Image: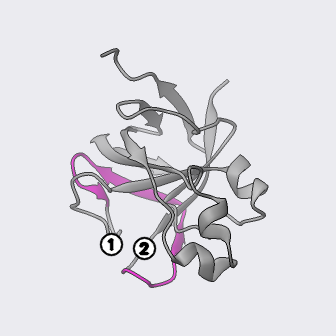
Amino acid sequence: MPGHVLGLFLKPGHGLPMREVQSVSAVAGQGLEGDASFGRSRRQVLLVDESILAEFNLHPGQTRENIALAGLSLTGLPAGTRLHIGAAILEVTGDCAPCALMDSIRPGLREAIRGQRGLLARVHQGGIISVADSVTIEPAPPG
């Protein structure tokens, strides 16, 4: 059973509050239009699944993720895994190391959430992503 997009968030600038949106344009090789990370090569999109948010009593967008997902687990997905989200395809580039901002949400959260903060991805194929879009996982190619 596929998962779905629970929430979409953009960073207008580093350190600024996240802006919740209903849809976003993902641009191949660039990231999400309107996000401060647009144009980066590796760290274009941060994805978090709702089970991690629930485990740490956090709300979607609170960990500065771009896409909150429901109905599937991102834990342990290797680099190269592709996520089909709406009309776009995102490719996992690795885990997101928690930053000091996590401790500003709750003291000790940075260490507690280590290894579970979410996954970084780049936009492999562009397209529109909207809240409630289905999400399916395409395993990374062997090797």
Judge left or right: residue 140 versus residue 59.
left
Check whether the beta carbons of the residues at disc 1 and disc 2 lie within 8 A of each other: yes
Residue placed at 71% from the left, 66% from the top?
59
- Which quadrant holds the N terminus? top right
Q: Which quarter of the image is occupied by the C terminus?
A: top left
Q: Is residue 95 magenta?
A: no
Q: Residue at x 51, y 51 (%)?
A: 47
Q: Please state the extent of the stretch shown in magenta in the rendering.
A: 14-32
As drawn, 41 above or below 107: above
Residue 46, image x, y percentages:
45, 55
- Residue in the picture at 47% in, 39% down: 86
| Residue 15 among those drawn in magenta | yes
Say which of 52 and 3 sits in front. 52
Count of numbered marks: 2
Looking at the image, is 98 positioned above or below residue 93? below
The numbered disc on residue 46 is none
The image quadrant that residue 91 belongs to is top left
For disc 2, the marked residue is: 11
Where residue 15 sits in the image (x, y, percent)?
A: 43, 83
The residue that label 1 is drawn on is 36
- Residue 119 x, y percent position in the rendering: 47, 48
Q: Is residue 126 visible?
A: no
Rendering quarter of residue 54: bottom right
What type is the residue that disc 1 sits on?
Answer: Ala
